[in-house]
Amino acid sequence: MLALPTKGVVRSIRTHNCDLSIFCDWIEANITFYCEELTIIDVADELLSHEVYVDQDFVREFISTCWDELLFRTKAYGIESTFSVHKARLQRVAVWEETPGYAFCLLLSLAPNYDWWKEASYNEQGMLFEELSNDSILSILDFKTYPTGWSSDNTKCFREHVVEICTQLNFGGGDVDKWDGSNKKEYGLDILAYYDFGDNRTGAPYYMFQCASGQNWRAKLQTPDLKIWREVLNPSVQPCRGFAIPFCLEIQEFERTCTKVGGVMLDRSRILGASKSCVSWLNDTLKDKLKAWCAPRVNWVLSGSMI
């Protein structure tokens, strides 16, 4: 089986100390990248052999909770799931190349939990995740999107983005000069999603999304900075924050995160759930880019270290 994560898997004698989300990601990685079938006994033996657990009944209690979480995830993923959940086993139903959006998000979730995983460039994964989130939002919501994408591929300056957003939302615009400084990237807007009534009037609902693909995502929960954007846009309708991550969160953490975001929360299960609205929700060009990004990293996971 794949090497256990170096984070989140903690010795459990009388209490379950392992991180449920991290361990379920590890199980998903095994059935997606390593084996075609995985049983409860396989998972229990792995934990017992590494002395994470010492009692068979206690470890099965934890794995039972994992199975419930995995069943929830597969239902949320829809056709993007690479595996099916049965009473005592998991069965692979698709290779990862058929669901590159899922594989990409799963690998992003695994990365922070292995000490040996060091990315050469976080910019690439960030831009890919923004593209993935944008395609998902287009399918989930009957909204239009405007990716700001402050990157080498998008040479628009901050002021040009503000003008475009005001045009799309029919706002008059505010004090751009005050905020058009060196720290504008910290304002945190990656994607604007808005409903278009088609009448060129203001008053449409819209969300301002931050897409956080790395392990420091919790530090970004208050971005985009809506106070700054209100000054910049002078909106007739107040903005609502949106937040997208490639991770799956245990229910209590998900609820706490929603409260901190104060808006729309898209985790991995919701992002991939776009397939329920549109089977071909992911554009072909992005699929190819995701496959190219995933392939060497799948090998890292299989080898248990960076190549």
Image (tube, rainbow, N blue to C red):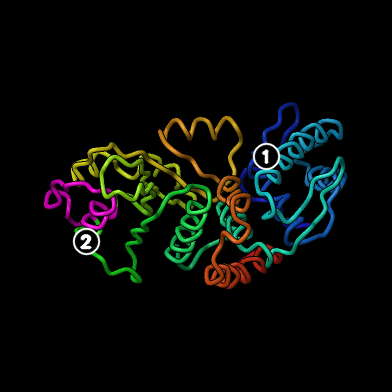
Q: Earlier in the sequence, mark 2 or mark 1?
A: 1
Q: Residues within 10 Å of mark 1 (few under 14, many from 20)?
A: some
State left or right for residue 279 relative to residue 164: right
Residue 151 in the image: x percent, y percent?
A: 34, 66
What span is in magenta? 162-185
Question: Of helix, strand and loop, which one carries label 1?
Answer: loop
Instruction: Give residue 40's quadrant in the image.
Output: top right
Residue 253 in the image: x percent, y percent?
A: 55, 33
Q: From the viewer's perspective, is residue 149 above or below residue 47? A: below
Q: Amino acid at mark 1?
A: Val
Q: Which residue is labeled 1 in the image?
A: 10
Queried whether the magenta region covers residue 289, the answer comes back as: no
State left or right for residue 108 relative to residue 39: left
Q: From the viewer's perspective, is residue 288 above or below residue 172? A: below
Q: From the viewer's perspective, is residue 29 above or below residue 155? A: above
C-alpha separation, residue under disc 2 versus residue under disc 1: 49 Å
Residue 293 marker: none
Q: Nearer the viewer, residue 265 or 4?
A: 265
Residue 137 in the image: x percent, y percent?
A: 48, 51
Q: Residues within 10 Å of mark 2 (few under 14, many from 20)?
A: few
* Front label number (2 vs 1): 2
Question: Of helix, strand and loop, which one carries label 2?
Answer: helix
Q: Nearer the viewer, residue 115 or 199?
A: 199
Q: Residue at x 32, y 68 (%)?
A: 154
Instruction: Give residue 55's quadrant in the image.
Output: top right
Q: Hey, which residue is sitting farthest front in the picture? A: 199
Work out which quarter of the rendered image holds the C terminus and state it: bottom right
Work out which quarter of the rendered image holds the N terminus and state it: bottom right
Q: Amino acid at mark 2?
A: Glu
Q: Nearer the viewer, residue 5 or 216?
A: 216
Q: Which residue is labeled 2 in the image?
A: 160
